[in-house]
Image (spheres, rainbow, N blue to C red):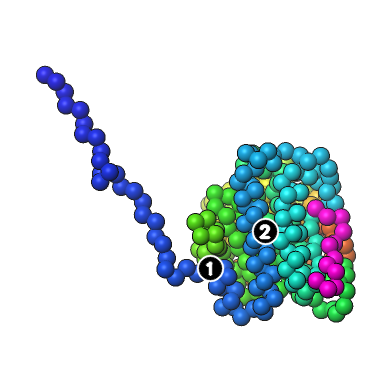
Amino acid sequence: MSQKSAPMATAVDIQRPTTHISSDPITLSRCLLASQAEPGFNILMASVVLACKTISQAVRKAGIAGLYGLEGSVNATGDSVKKLDLLSNSVFINSLKYSRELSVLVSEEEDVPLIIEESLAGKYCVVTDPLDGSSNIDCNVSTGTIFGVYKRKTEGKASLADVLRPGNELVAAGYCMYGSSTQLVLTIGKGVNGFTLDPSVGEFILTHPNIKIPSKPKTVYSINEGNTKYWHEPVRRFVDEKKCQDPKPYSLRYVGSMVSDVHRTLLYGGIFMYPSDKKSKNGKLRLLYEGNPMAMICEQAGGVASTGFKRVLDIKPTEIHERTPIFLGCKRDVSRIIELHSKY
């Protein structure tokens, strides 16, 4: 007796996901227009967005285009330069300098600021880490771009003084994360919004409106525990305390890419830490284009950003590649680390 085979599934039997196409998408450009920001700022942001889209494509094509690996040089802050670092830096410079809204650009990859000639200069100064987390790019870990925007207070030819200002004078800060999707998180001082790039239309669509660190944050800490033997006592005590906390110990979550670690902290809560220690007395992260933009975003999302002794945004930088320790995240955890620092 022959055995009947199971009938082959037809096209009607297979359930395919449907893709919803909005007839009224809320894009980043639309949000900026609704905010009634100055036209020049919107033009500048359009250039930042173009840079982020271009870098996103470069990151996704890195393996195919031969962009993995070291370029062979060392940047202004002593880090080995990846091929994608150089490309991302060039993309950011070229996207912004002809906008006629930029006067000064500070980049992690440049020894000195780029000063735009007076005839082409605008009202704004931009500070950026064009490709944060690039040391992880070869193993396909999420990377990102961090940026902050200052508005000039001076007239005439721009100078270094236009950017050596505390983070509390930033008019905007954001980051773009290149992961399973490309997401841009932005604040203009009126809360934090997250946008996801829709490749089919080439636009950033609002997907995370009014981001707030949860009122009941997860018990998560983020730090490089490979540096444990160098930690100062307040950090050591905080981590030991949280790992042994009852009834629920904290979990360690650390990517090693600031954009990824801060993004998780914003969405879930907890604390991100890159402290000063016995090896790096001033910390490792740069104040102007990493610490300040991320601190502004964190505070606008209802969190706290501190060096352990003072508010990050109140520090006036003395040079463009100045480093700072940083603790940022929910009030519950950052308040505790500040308390511990006050005892030592």
Q: Secondary structure at mark 1?
A: loop
Disc 1 residue type?
Answer: Thr
| Residue 262: x %, y % from top left | 64, 57
Q: Secondary structure at mark 2?
A: helix
User: Dot 1, how many residues are within 10 Å of its Cα: few (below 14), some (14-19), or many (20+)?
Assistant: some
Prevalent SS, magenta region: loop
Q: Which mark is residue 136?
A: none
- Residue 118 included in the magenta stretch of the image: yes
The residue beneath circle 2 is: 51
Does 113 sit left or right of 192 as displayed? right
The magenta stretch spans which residues?
109-120
Q: Residue at x 71, y 46 (%)?
A: 84
Does 260 sit left or right of 231 as displayed? left
Image quarter hosting the N terminus: top left
Q: Which mark is residue 27?
A: 1
Q: Residue at x 51, y 60 (%)?
A: 201
| Residue 306: x %, y % from top left | 73, 64
Image quarter hosting the C terminus: bottom right
